[in-house]
Structures are given as C-alpha cells and as structure tokens.
Amino acid sequence: MKLNWQRISLHILFWAVYVPLNAVLNCILQRVPLEESFREALIGEFFSLPVKLLLTYFVFYYVIPLYLDRSKIYKLVGLLLAAFVVATVVYRLEIAYVYFPIFRPGETYNFLNPKGLLLTEFDLFITLAAAVTIKMIRVHYKSLEFEQELMREKLQSELSFLRAQTNPHFLFNTLNNLYVLARKKSDKTPDAIMMLSKIMRFVLYECRAPRISVMDEAKIIQDYIELEKLRYSKRLTVDYHEEIDNPVTSIAPLLLLPFVENSFKHGAGGTTGDVAISIRISLHEQKLSFVVQNTMDPDGEGATGIAADVGGIGLRNVQRQLALIYPDQHELTTTRDHGLFTANLKINLSY
C-alpha cells in the first residue's frame, strides 16, 4: 500500500503544534509561572502523548465511521465512553508509574484524586476535540470540493451534449439548402457542396476545442453567408461588418453562427420577396457585441425570429450554452419592429 506522505506530514504537524500549546494551557490551568514550569509541562505532554495518539486514532478510524450507520448509535456512544475510561486509566497509570518515579522521585501520586481525574478527562477531551474538529473541517471542505467537481463534470457533460446536438442540426439545415439547389439543377450546386465541406471540416474538427479565436468564429460566419448567397442569389442582400481589436481573443465555438443561420431561415427562407440581412461583430477590450437583423414578413411577425425557433435545437442550445459558459456575463435581447427582427448579444469574454 502506497503511503500518503502529505497526509502523514499534516498529522505530524498537528501534533508538533498541539503538544507545546497544550503544555502552555496546563501551566495556565495550574496557575504556575510559564517560564518556570513550561519545560516540566512539555515533558509531561510527551509522556501522555502515546495515550492521546491511541485514543484519537481509535476514535478517528473505528468510532467515527459508526456515525454513518444510524442503527449503531448506541455502539458508538458505548465505545466512545469505554475509550475514554481506558485512556484515563492508562494515562493515570503512566503518570504514576513512569513519570513520577523518573522526574518526581519520593513524591506520592493519588491515582483516584478527583481533581486529577477531572484534569485528565479534560486534557483527553481537549485533545480529541481539537483533532476531531480539524478532521471534520477537512472532511467538510473535501466534500465541498467533491460536490463542485461533480457539478463541473455535470455541466461539462451537458455542454458536450448540447454541442453534439448542434453539429448535426447545423448539417441538417445546410443540407436542406443543397437540396433546394439540386432540385433547381443549379450550376452552383458543386460550389455549394465544396463550401459545405469546408464549413463542416471546421465544425467537426476545429470546434472540438473549448475555445476558438473570435476571428475563426467570424470566418465561419462569412463562409456560411457565401453559402447562403448561392441559394438565394439576387433577392438576398447581406451587409456584414466586423470591428475586432484583438483577433486572438477566445470565445466558445459556434455561439454566433446559429443566430446568423436563424436570420436566413426566418428572413430569406420565411419570405418570398427581397430580403436584407445585417450582421455586426464588434470586439473592444474583450467586450463582444453581436447584432443580427433581418427583414421579415410583417403579416407573420408572430411566427418569425427566435420565438418561432424556441422548439428547435439550434438557438435553444445556444441560449443554454451561454448560460453555462458565460453565467451573468452575457445579455441577449430580441426585438421586432416594422418588419425588422433584431437579435443583440453582448458577452464579456474576459470571464
């Protein structure tokens, strides 16, 4: 069995600190000058240390585990009382037949002295209380760390599941676009397939990292715009603008693209006339501002935009990812006004 040297060192440190402190406490309780009696009290502590060690570790590793089994509470109390009785007897015997003959020869020692018995019980209790308190504090913090680790793993699993859903959802919607081009027997279909291949390579491989650069996210958005232009041709106008002060600033992958995808789905795909889409990416001092606007059919305002996609996977997943990755560090608002739908996302990327 491999020894835990860190744990052993902490136990040694506890006793190395406890012994002199308890010697000082004994001097105070006996109302004797510290400078005259500390050495004698310290020697007495070393003589009683084996008893305290046996009592403490017996309680640690045999009595305390019974606390977890409520059906053994009487056994726990009985063992605790028996341990104190045995420790008290051994403690008093050690003082009477080892300590006094060596350091106080000729003096008598009253084994059953009530005051002495009370001080012995108090000494053992203080020792055990100090050790158990520190152990319980340590167990409490280890429990908190374990709970936090479980929570982190749970959130990471949920995030991985959301991203696993996002990729096929994106592929499904994009294949629908190719299907439309193929039905029209458009000459642009081969170009669209190559563009999709490029996008999917990014989605499947480069987006495995927990973070990518804002510039990479912006580039995939531009590629997606070009792919959509092949489908909608002249009736679609896209105004794209980016202003990024630090291109290598990191962001969780594929958080912005679903908003662009949604604007095409409910803008160009949801209307029959000319469509205008505006996309603005601004990054200044790690504060990201992302605004997507698309025209829509005024008669169908209630069925367009993000609200219409609440039941879908894409934007619902993005909203959940934002809550997991950037809690209290993002703001998402949507508005509909006079045939124009706007999604405005702000993220503090320094988080």
Image (cartoon, rainbow, N blue to C red):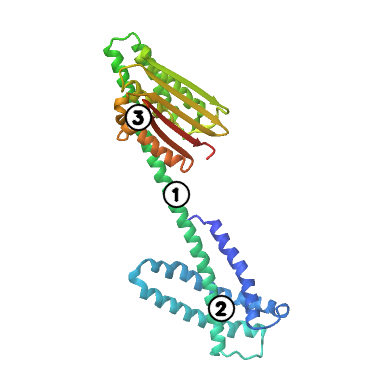
State the residue position of label 1.
Answer: 149
| Residue under the image location 28 percent in, 9 percent down | 185
Report how far apart the C-alphas of labels 2 and 1 lie in the structure: 39 Å
Q: Residue furthest top?
A: 187
Residue 7 placement, left or right of 63: right
**Residue 310 x %, y %:** 32, 35
Q: Are marks 3 and 2 in contact (CB under 8 Å)?
A: no
How many labels sit on residues?
Answer: 3
Q: Earlier in the sequence, mark 2 or mark 1?
A: 2
The residue closer to the viewer here, 81 or 279, is: 279
Residue 95 placement, left or right of 342: right
Report how far apart the C-alphas of labels 1 and 3 lie in the structure: 38 Å
Q: Earlier in the sequence, mark 3 or mark 2?
A: 2
| Label 3: how many Cα within 10 Å (few below 14, some 14–19, many 20+) | many
Q: Amino acid at mark 3?
A: Gly
| Label 2: how many Cα within 10 Å (few below 14, some 14–19, many 20+) | some
**In this rendering, the label closer to the viewer, 3 or 2:** 3
Report how far apart the C-alphas of labels 3 and 2 lie in the structure: 73 Å
Q: Amino acid at mark 2?
A: Asp
| Residue under the image location 39 percent in, 41 percent down | 157
Q: Is residue 204 visible?
A: no
Q: Residue furthest front?
A: 338
State the residue position of label 3.
Answer: 305
The residue closer to the viewer here, 332 or 58, is: 332
The residue closer to the viewer here, 158 or 30, is: 158
Q: Amino acid at mark 1?
A: Glu
Q: Is residue 135 visible?
A: yes
| Label 1: how many Cα within 10 Å (few below 14, some 14–19, many 20+) | few
State the residue position of label 2.
Answer: 123
